Image (cartoon, rainbow, N blue to C red):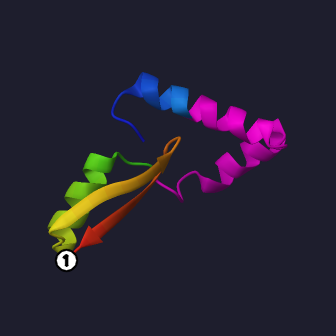
Amino acid sequence: MFSDTEKNALYIELYHQFKKANGYSDLEISRKRSALENVLIPETIEAASGRESEAAGFSLFEPWFQCFNFASMFAVK
């Protein structure tokens, strides 16, 4: 997720539009969201970076890909 709540809401809406454009119904999008609630907990990249760097001892932690509000990161010990 993003620190800025307006930006976060915009990206979520754009992601839902992307899903609709690729054939997903509102019901399918809603069910997927419900299935992931309290399972996939969103956090900012800064929060993930701090958690991973401190807890696991990574010397490098960087996002390398982002599409809408999903991101992939790499870390080096």
In terms of depth relative to the viewer, which is nearer, 36 or 49? 49
Q: Is residue 50 left or right of residue 31?
A: left
At x 70% / y 37%, what residue is drawn? 18
Task: Decide whether the magenta segment is chiefly helix, strand or loop.
Answer: helix
Q: Quadrant where the C terminus lies?
A: bottom left
In the rendered image, residue 32 lying in the magenta stretch gets the answer: yes
Query: Which residue, as the protein is rendered here, is positioned at the far front?
Result: 64
Is the residue 1 above or below the residue 54 in the image? Answer: above
At x 44% / y 22%, what residue is drawn? 6
Q: Is residue 18 left or right of residue 68?
A: right
In the rendered image, residue 22 lying in the magenta stretch gets the answer: yes
Find disc 1 in the rendering and name its residue. Answer: 77
Q: Where is residue 67? Give x, y as percent.
A: 52, 46
Q: Of the residues shown, which amino acid type is indicated by label 1?
A: Lys
Q: Quadrant of residue 27?
A: top right
Q: Where is residue 34? Give x, y as percent.
A: 67, 48
SS of the residue under disc 1:
loop
At x 25% / y 56%, what residue is drawn? 49
At x 67% / y 55%, what residue is drawn? 35
Q: Is residue 66 left or right of residue 75?
A: right
Q: Where is residue 57? Give x, y as percent.
A: 15, 73
> Number of marks in the image?
1
Q: Is residue 49 left or right of residue 23?
A: left
Is the residue 9 above or below the residue 2 in the image? Answer: above
Q: Quadrant where the N terminus lies?
A: top left
Q: Write the start and end of the magenta stretch as one range.
A: 12-41
Query: Which residue, as the protein is rendered here, is positioned at the far top?
Result: 6
